Image (tube, rainbow, N blue to C red):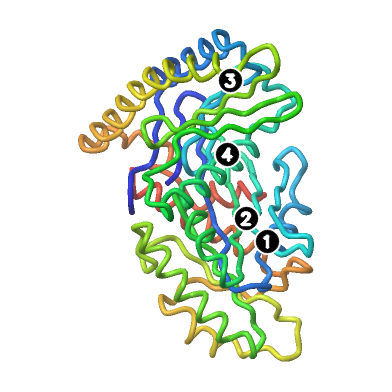
Amino acid sequence: MPGSDLIMFEEEFGSVDQELQRLQAQSNARVVFLVDKNGQLIASAGEVLGLDTTSLASLTAGNIAATGGMAKLLGEKEFSVLFHEGEKDNIHISIVDQRIILVVIFDQRSSLGLVRLRVKKSAEALAKIFQSVSEKSRKEGSTGKVSVSPFAEITDEDIDNLFG
Amino acid sequence: MSFINYSSREINVKLVYYGPGLCGKTTNLHYIYRKTNPEAKGKMISLATETERTLFFDFLPLALGEIRGFKTRFHLYTVPGQVFYDASRKLILKGVDGVVFVADSQVERMEANVESMDNLRVNLSEQGYDMDKIPFVVQYNKRDLPNVAPVPEMEKILNHRGLPSYEAVATTGVGVFDTLKNLAKQVLFELKKGH
């Protein structure tokens, strides 16, 4: 199968969380979240209560995928930044390290300029964290350490229970 | 490509419903949505045209419960079935963990089924997947209609791997959960193998 599964450990998750909170505070944003390119929400910070982050994550990935398709048709590698302007809220979407999507939702308390500036800084920090995530996944995969996976001993019954 | 988060103890997997136009992919998701406890499901999103033809995808997140202390989430997607939306179909297959092929049982749709299956094989291989290896279920939908092809005949044409297949009437829910459950099982066992 292409690519490996994204496996996130406690330590890296903490760093990602911290970085998102920093970005949200420094850019005066309402909400900041990270999505992988397949539409899975990785982490979020800010006023997420009442916000359907799962759907937002899936639509964001769809959006990036569609834009990526357009880029290919034009001979571009990707469009790394998308910006949607609304009456009250705006969405700034950018690709970090070619694999993770960083989404910032902000209103009049912030500005596009400030968001762009802060996103750039955070993107570098996040890229570093995700490089160490994939290194760790690779290492633990090759040493067989991930055999502590919750799935190692999964049974038919476990799955039947899911469906009640 | 599943996403395992050891920090929040969550596992997310992506399942895609594929098949020719009007075969009942969206209807499968609608039924699952209707029959799932409110606390186990998120909002269902349909990016469709005014005539309710899928334009980009339908999306339904399901959080059915825990396995070994890990919240297990299934993200169900459909693709647009109409031939000219091929670019969109390719995008939705990115990172897929398992595929349901929904076949339209009506005799006159057999060619469309075959064409869609061939298209799936091509699109999967473009993403680096081998259709003969990924978790896969075939569903023969619309069994309630009068002009359906016999199942053994459909098996011969559409189920080369001899995988589990289900007869279904997605409008009333017949076979819908059996299909989903079997795919979920295959995907989770695949994860077990992988780790």
Disc 1 marks a residue whose amino acid type is: Thr
Q: Are marks 2 and 1 in contact (CB under 8 Å)?
A: yes
* Quadrant placement of the C terminus of chain B: top left
Q: Nearer the viewer, residue B188 or B101?
A: B101
Between the residue at mark 2 and the residue at mark 1, the CA separation in whole angstroms equals: 6 Å
Q: How many marks?
A: 4
CA distance for labels 4 and 1 = 18 Å
* Distance (Cα) linking label 1 and label 3: 33 Å
User: Does residue B129 lie above or below B191 as drawn?
Assistant: below
The disc, 4 or 3, on the residue closer to the chain's N-terminal end is 4
Q: Position of residue B185 (x, y in %)?
A: 51, 55
Residue on which the image places disc 1: B54
Say what amino acid the circle numbered 4 marks. Thr
| Circle on res. B57 | 2
**Alpha carbon distance from label 2 to label 3:** 30 Å
Residue with the mark numbered 4: A60
Mark 4: few/some/many CA within 10 Å (<14, 14-19, 20+): many
For mark 2, give the secondary structure.
strand
Element type at marker 3?
Answer: helix
Q: As shown in the figure, which amino acid type bears the numbered disc 3? A: Leu
What is the chain letter for disc 4?
A
- Residue bearing the label numbered 3: A112
| Chain containing mark 1 | B
